[in-house]
């Protein structure tokens, strides 16, 4: 009887500590893993938003960049982390929605191994070329690849870049060689230098080179124009209906993270992303703040996984 009583008391004590732990959270610095390189779009968004969350929580948030394998290296670190709210992930399409469509081995389940806390927002993906490439439209670019067969390549460092490049080959017959990069900033450097001739990357990462006139945008990867790139045509007005890709950034925690911690982040992010000055700062780096309820993010993630799987299949991509 004493044995069972001690077990019951022990369980009651353990259960009693969980709400207390959540109530005292956070009492030490939080690590936010960004699975992309410094200077990437996701990294830029983190550095705009996280100071607001630090102020709201009264605790330091350390940004830890762990790039590679289209975001899966850093994401795997968080999937294996303790579910205590002190190791979080700022993931995106490449790490979660499209990872299994591109890679045979993804060392985590993008749904089961995480809690999808909240979407930060979205950014457009333009098709970019060096400023001196003699083309102004996608159709002119395709003609250029055929006139220079075997000499034209596309760079990619993430899922949208890969799928968009392959879509040009499959749907328009572009003669292109794929060149993978570990990180988008390095790919943009080579694009500016003309070592690769086209790439698709988030507007945030490309913004400085676009504004500097070193690269040009031929089209977005969406059917309609983006409010953040009003001067760049969408695919529909160019006569193409075979692609609709939009990227997002979202906050994740390891599966099993206490709901009180998840809800705390949802509340603080909802407040921050509704502030006009933060919305303006995000727009300045090419990012549109989310307007939807954070609680909808888990369902939207599963829908996005299906969409990206379909887009990869239509582009003729098989997991490698």
Image: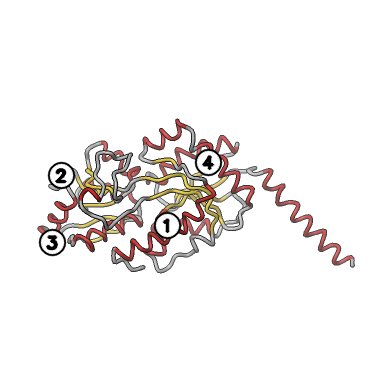
Secondary structure of the residue carrying tag 3 is loop
Among the two numbered marks 2 and 1 on one chain, the one whose residue lies closer to the N terminus: 2
Which residue does the image show at 16% across and 56% down from the upper left? 142
The span from disc 2 to disc 4 (Cα, nearest Å) is: 42 Å
> Dot 2 surroundings within 10 Å: few (below 14), some, or many (20 or more)?
few
Q: Are marks 3 and 4 in contact (CB under 8 Å)?
A: no
Among the two numbered marks 3 and 2 on one chain, the one whose residue lies closer to the N terminus: 2
Mark 2 vs mark 1, foreground winner is 1
Among the two numbered marks 2 and 4 on one chain, the one whose residue lies closer to the N terminus: 2
Residue 172, horizontal then vertical, whole percent? 19, 60
Secondary structure of the residue carrying tag 4 is helix
Residue hosting label 4: 269
Q: Is residue 295 toward the left or the right of residue 176 in the image?
A: right
The span from disc 3 to disc 1 (Cα, nearest Å) is: 35 Å
Which mark identifies residue 304? Answer: 1
Q: Are marks 1 and 4 in contact (CB under 8 Å)?
A: no
Q: Quadrant of residue 306?
A: bottom left
Among the two numbered marks 3 and 1 on one chain, the one whose residue lies closer to the N terminus: 3
Among the two numbered marks 3 and 4 on one chain, the one whose residue lies closer to the N terminus: 3
Mark 2 vs mark 4, foreground winner is 4
């Amino acid at each position: 009887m004493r044995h069972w009583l001690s077990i019951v008391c022990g369980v009651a004590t353990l259960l009693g500590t969980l709400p207390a732990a959540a109530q005292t959270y956070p009492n030490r610095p939080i690590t936010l893993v960004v699975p992309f390189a410094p200077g990437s779009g996701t990294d830029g968004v983190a550095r705009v938003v996280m100071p607001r969350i630090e102020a709201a929580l009264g605790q330091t948030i350390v940004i830890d960049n762990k790039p590679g394998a289209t975001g899966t290296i850093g994401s795997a670190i968080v999937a294996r982390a303790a579910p205590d709210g002190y190791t979080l992930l700022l993931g995106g399409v490449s790490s979660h929605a499209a990872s299994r469509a591109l890679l045979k081995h993804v060392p985590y389940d993008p749904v089961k191994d995480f809690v999808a806390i909240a979407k930060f927002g979205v950014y457009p993906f333009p098709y970019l070329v060096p400023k001196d490439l003699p083309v102004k439209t996608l159709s002119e670019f395709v003609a250029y690849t055929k006139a220079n067969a075997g000499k034209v390549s596309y760079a990619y460092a993430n899922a949208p870049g890969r799928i968009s490049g392959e879509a040009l080959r499959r749907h328009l017959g572009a003669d292109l060689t794929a060149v993978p990069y570990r990180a988008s900033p390095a790919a943009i450097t080579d694009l500016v230098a003309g070592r690769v001739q086209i790439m698709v990357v988030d507007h945030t990462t490309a913004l400085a080179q676009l504004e500097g006139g070193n690269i040009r945008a031929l089209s977005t990867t969406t059917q309609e124009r983006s409010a953040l790139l009003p001067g760049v045509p969408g695919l529909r007005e160019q006569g193409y209906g075979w692609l609709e890709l939009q990227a997002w950034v979202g906050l994740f925690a390891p599966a099993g993270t206490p709901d009180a911690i998840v809800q705390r982040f949802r509340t603080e992010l909802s407040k921050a992303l509704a502030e006009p000055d933060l919305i303006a700062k995000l727009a300045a780096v090419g990012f549109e703040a989310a307007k939807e309820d954070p609680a909808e993010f888990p369902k939207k993630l599963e829908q996005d996984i299906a969409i990206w799987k379909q887009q990869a299949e239509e582009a003729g991509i098989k997991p490698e």
